[in-house]
Image: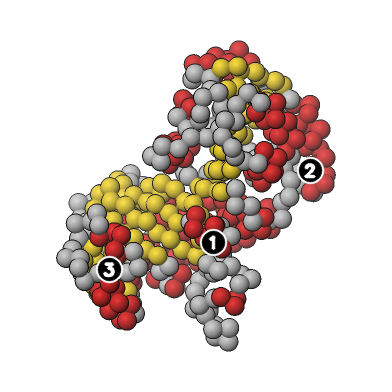
């Protein structure tokens, strides 16, 4: 059973046993019923999602399109809790919203759905708010067991990048999974306060710090390393580079994906693991308008690998910061999404550099042509200049290692 928002009924009904399609506009439901009169596995209902009544654990898949942006904060929290309750264990929800701006973009008022003289009824919330809410909600079933969402991924809708150069049409895939019964279940009021204010305020703080960032202190060392290694491979034209930037010690420790796209004429898939930084990356993408660069958010590195493994896709290079220090980092998994002989470039902040152990670890994972260099002096010099120029302070690190290899 699928809860659908009308326009995708035909596609979903091709594989679903049963579809319930709802819309709050009667004429839309009439047209939907007319267009899909040949389908016998579809039921239609007029009504808003907030008041939709379904049995607990009765749905396998919830699909929404442009719904929560028309809801108040209270209604949005209520709806997400209802989705978690409606879904059967291991069921999925696929949600899509306009984040931060309309689907047509802020500068395209002439093609907006809304009259220029009327107030726009929509709430173009930060993408990070939805991620935080989806990760925070919990429900307790009649047996006393807790359930939560595993937010598998967040990414921009490709169609809107191609057609509208808009990275802020964002969609999420979540799955209902068991939660720890010993952890406390947040109250509705707590969720609402965070969704309405706390998370908003935090995002605005990060926006003030990171919006407008044109350069990254890793620019020179990453591009130089990749240039020296790219002659070994890059079989695709254009090549595809997978970038992973957890930004644990500093929000400024990441990779400039737009620079990589320009310098190597490459398509870039950049994975963020912090919702707030992910939102700032989408802002940068919307400003730069380079369709070769895409950003995604995953809670764990392994899930970013699963995302592309399921699509049977591979890349021509892997670039990351803080990879070896991540508990979830799996070098063997990296190989699953890379073509043979693809270069790997890692920038690692370490307490000390034990080249033999690093080489052993990478060799065990099947990497070859491994080289470990102490680049502490180079990065320290660059950092001093970067900190002074931007009036910031990046936490000091004892040693910096540049690790180069191929698969």
Q: Quadrant of residue 48?
A: bottom left
Residue at horizontal 64 percent and vertical 71 percent from the top: 107
Element type at mark 3: strand
- Please report whichever mark, 3 or 1, sits nearer to the chain's N-terminal start: 3
Q: Quadrant of residue 279?
A: bottom right
CB atoms of marks 3 and 2 within 8 Å: no
Q: CA distance from mark 2 to mark 1?
A: 38 Å
Identity of the residue furthest to the left in this view: 40
Label 2 crowd (10 A; few <14 / some 14-19 / many >=20): few
Element type at mark 1: helix
Residue 93 vertical position relative to residue 264 in the rendered view, above or below: below
Q: Considering depth in this image, is 382 or 44 the residue closer to the camera? A: 44
Residue 206 vertical position relative to residue 388 in the rendered view, above or below: below
Mark 3, residue position: 21
Residue at horizontal 32 percent and vertical 81 percent from the top: 27
- Residue 328, given in percent of the width and then of the height, sits at 47, 32
142 vs 276, left or right, is left
Q: Considering depth in this image, is 392 or 271 the residue closer to the camera? A: 271
Q: CA distance from mark 3 to mark 1?
A: 27 Å
- Please report whichever mark, 2 or 1, sits nearer to the chain's N-terminal start: 1
Residue 280 vertical position relative to residue 360 in the rendered view, above or below: below
Judged by depth in the image, the label closer to the viewer, 3 or 1, is: 1
Q: Considering depth in this image, is 229 or 58 the residue closer to the camera? A: 229
Mark 2, residue position: 387
Instruction: Answer whether residue 111 is visible to the viewer in this image.
Output: yes
Residue at horizontal 59 percent and vertical 55 percent from the top: 282
Judged by depth in the image, the label closer to the viewer, 3 or 2, is: 3
Judged by depth in the image, the label closer to the viewer, 2 or 1, is: 1
Mark 1, residue position: 163
- Please report whichever mark, 3 or 2, sits nearer to the chain's N-terminal start: 3
Instruction: Answer whether residue 182 is visible to the viewer in this image.
Output: no
């Amino acid at each position: 059973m699928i809860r659908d928002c009308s326009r995708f009924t035909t596609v979903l009904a091709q594989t679903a046993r049963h579809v319930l399609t709802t819309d709050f506009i009667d004429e839309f439901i009439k047209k939907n019923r007319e267009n899909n009169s040949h389908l016998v596995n579809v039921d239609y209902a007029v009504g808003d999602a907030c008041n939709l009544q379904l049995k607990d654990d009765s749905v396998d898949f919830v699909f929404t399109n442009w719904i929560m942006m028309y809801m108040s904060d209270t209604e949005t929290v209520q709806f997400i809790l209802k989705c978690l309750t409606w879904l059967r264990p291991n069921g999925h929800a696929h949600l899509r919203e306009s984040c931060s701006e309309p689907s047509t973009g802020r500068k395209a008022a002439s093609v907006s759905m809304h009259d220029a003289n009327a107030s726009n009824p929509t709430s173009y919330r930060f993408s990070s708010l939805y991620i935080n809410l989806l990760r925070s909600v919990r429900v307790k079933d009649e047996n006393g067991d807790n359930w939560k969402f595993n937010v598998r991924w967040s990414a921009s809708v490709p169609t809107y990048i191609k057609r509208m150069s808009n990275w802020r049409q964002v969609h999420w895939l979540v799955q209902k999974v068991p939660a720890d019964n010993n952890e406390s279940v947040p109250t509705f009021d707590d969720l609402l306060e965070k969704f309405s204010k706390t998370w908003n305020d935090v995002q605005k703080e990060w926006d003030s710090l990171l919006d407008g960032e044109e350069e990254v202190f890793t620019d020179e060392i990453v591009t130089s390393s990749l240039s020296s290694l790219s002659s070994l491979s890059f079989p695709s034209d254009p090549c595809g580079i997978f970038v992973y930037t957890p930004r644990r010690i500093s929000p400024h420790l990441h990779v400039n994906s737009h620079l990589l796209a320009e310098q190597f004429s490459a398509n870039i898939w950049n994975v963020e693991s912090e919702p707030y930084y992910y939102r700032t990356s989408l802002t940068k993408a919307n400003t730069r308008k380079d369709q070769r660069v895409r950003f995604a958010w995953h809670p764990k590195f392994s899930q970013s690998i699963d995302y592309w493994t399921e699509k049977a896709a591979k890349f021509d290079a892997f670039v990351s910061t803080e990879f070896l220090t991540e508990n979830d980092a799996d070098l063997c998994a990296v190989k699953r999404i890379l073509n043979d002989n693809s270069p790997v470039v890692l920038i690692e902040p370490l307490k000390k550099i034990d080249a033999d152990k690093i080489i052993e670890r990478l060799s065990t994972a099947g990497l070859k042509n491994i080289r470990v260099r102490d680049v502490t002096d180079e990065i320290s010099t660059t950092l001093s200049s970067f900190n002074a120029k931007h009036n910031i302070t990046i936490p000091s690190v004892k040693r910096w290692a540049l690790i180069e290899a191929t698969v």
